[in-house]
Image: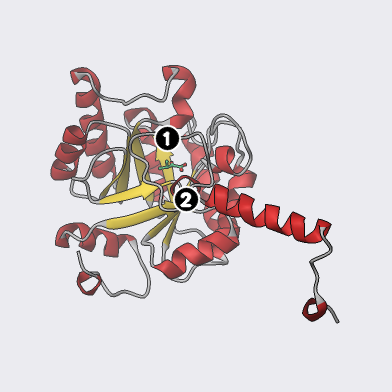
Amino acid sequence: MSTERRMNVNKITTHVLQAMKEKGEKISMLTAYDFSLAKIVDHAGIDIILVGDSASNVMAGHDTTLPITLDQMIYHASSVMRAINRALVVVDLPFGSYQGNSKEALQSAIRIMKESGAHAVKMEGGLEIKESVLRILSAGVPVMGHLGLTPQSINKFGTYTVRATEEREAAKLMEDALLLEELGCFSIVLEKIPAILAREVAKQVKVPIIGIGAGPDVDGQVLVLHDMLGINQGFHPRFLRRYLNLYDEIKGAVSNYIDDVKNCDFPNAQEQY
Ligand code: KIV
């Protein structure tokens, strides 16, 4: 789709995203966790910034998303909120802040909205988290669902392989997607599932479906910023397209700086007072 056919809006809202789905304009979404990168991503014109709990991996170096806390998510989200003008900002409710207790789930969502100023929250799961989703929605907080590979459940599944390849799991995913739509979620992320299933979900569900490793026939795409910029090395899922190799670029720049300092080449006559 050419730049001219993009919707020309100053602010992305959940209603704008719905209109994009209805007009067939694809939705772009990336993660960001800090002020400086969020500013660049917003200025580039991204539609949705996800303050993902993947911050646990890419910012803090944990093996899973489980350790990140609500306070840490709020810190990342408020840094992002100070940077953005146009994007809709969605924040992951971290593991342990919403499963099993819908009152606690609402408190967690309220803390994120009040303390960061974000626009919406994202939650992993379907029927299992119905009560929490309902309670949060009833407080006027927009909710994005997340089905398929749900990294907060890694200890239940044991691997990060493609999900919903079996008929029973695929049927449950479709039921969960329809349920989340019925409850009032404004959008759903589908992670690492067969493209053919994602296409069917995007056809049957009326709210925007955003894919990551879910093929082209959904309403939008999301990637982890550090992965698509090539900051992370050693993570090569099939669905990941790398747009830069920042690891090598940054390493080269830092090596040049070290050489310049060691060789007394920095600072030079112009770089001093
Ligand atoms: O936390 C995250 O970055 C995510 C995306 C992978 C969708 O949930």
Task: Determine the image quadrant of residue 270.
Answer: bottom right
Q: What element carries label 2?
A: helix
How many numbered circles does the render carry? Answer: 2
The front one of 37 and 164 is 37
Residue at figure coordinates x 28%, y 60% from the top left:
17
Quote the CA–CA distance across marks 1 and 2: 14 Å
The location of residue 179, given as percent across then percent down, is 25, 36
Q: What residue type is labelled 2?
A: Leu
The location of residue 117, given as percent across then percent down, is 53, 61
Q: In this view, does 102 lie to the left or right of 168?
A: right
Quarter of the image that includes the C terminus: bottom right
* Disc 1 versus disc 2: nearer the observer: 1
Q: In this view, does 87 lie to the left or right of 249?
A: left
Q: Circle 1 is placed at which residue position? A: 236
The location of residue 263, given as percent across then percent down, is 82, 59
Q: What residue type is labelled 1?
A: His
Task: Report if residue 190 is visible in the image.
Answer: yes
Vertical arrangement, residue 234 with respect to residue 109, above or below? above
What's the image's color scheme?
secondary structure
Vertical arrangement, residue 90 with respect to residue 67, above or below? below
Vertical arrangement, residue 117 with respect to residue 190, above or below? below
The front one of 36 and 103 is 36
**Mark earlier in primary sequence (1, 2):** 2
Q: Circle 2 is placed at which residue position? A: 225
Task: Determine the image quadrant of residue 140.
Answer: bottom left
Quarter of the image that includes the N terminus: bottom left
Task: Report if residue 75 is visible in the image.
Answer: no
Image quarter where ligand 1 lies: top left
Residue at figure coordinates x 41%, y 47% from the top left:
242
